[in-house]
Amino acid sequence: MVYDRDIDAKMTRTSLRPLPAGLIDMKEGLFLGFILSALGLLWAFSLSYLFGLVVFAGLFIDVIIYTIWLKRRSAWSIIWGGISGGMPVLAGRVLGIGHVDYLGVLLAVAILCWIPTHILTFNMRYSDDYKAAGIPTIPSKYGIKVTHRIIIISSLGAALAFGLSALLLGLDWGYLRLLAVLTTGIIGLAIISFFRPSDKIYVGLFKFASIFMLSAMIAVALGSYF
């Protein structure tokens, strides 16, 4: 947020955040961010060296690769943002079992596939904001139709990754049916947005994508525990 305060000030959606609005001094924000990150990493490494490495990887990819290096240069920076977004679930799995396994990676892939659905709907709805800030996006670079196709494919990828994870965990049919309903909803909205694009549909897809992720994670967690 400290690094992005200049572009946040140019976007209507983010201009009232504390840093671009001048409510918090840049040095204060930088100090708080550094202290929280350092304490978090120290805690992570104290619990498990491998857990700490995964947490550090998520932080490094998000701050250095995604935010500082690629966000202002490439529309495909969201891929790296998705990788960093998948690190928490992988880290949790590592802390739980003591090593990296295929299931942890698969859940991280589910988040990586989900990120485009979550972010690209924002890119389309707030296209003027991103243009004003000079941030390259897939809609502005490749067009709306390509963006819709990516959303459909990424939604399907996230659904398949969650479904396979559920099967590998041996979840019963109740949880599998819930995942099937969630999958139908997110893919259905993605297809509707392709044929009938509108701000209303984008907002609906964005919100349902969040519900999809939360519900799928809860289903996988509860289904594997009980």
Image: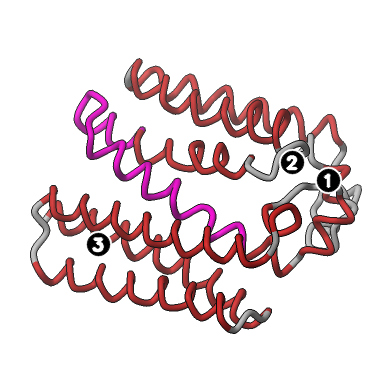
As drawn, 102 above or below 162: above
Counting other residues with Cα less than 10 Å from the Cα at mark 2, is it few (<14), some (14-19), or many (20 or more)? Answer: some
- Residue designated by label 2: 1
Q: Earlier in the sequence, mark 2 or mark 1?
A: 2
- Amino acid type of disc 3? Ala
SS at badge 2 = loop
Separation of disc 1 and disc 3 at Cα?
37 Å
Q: Earlier in the sequence, mark 2 or mark 3?
A: 2
> Which part of the image, by quadrant, shows the N terminus?
top right
Give x and y (percent) for residue 187: 41, 71
Q: Is residue 46 left or right of residue 20?
A: left
- Residue designated by label 1: 19
Does the magenta stretch mainly form a helix, a strand or a loop? helix
Residue visible at 51% across and 36% down in the picture: 84
Closer to us: mark 1 or mark 3? 3
Counting other residues with Cα less than 10 Å from the Cα at mark 1, is it few (<14), some (14-19), or many (20 or more)? Answer: many
Identify which residue, 52 or 207, lies in the foreground.
207
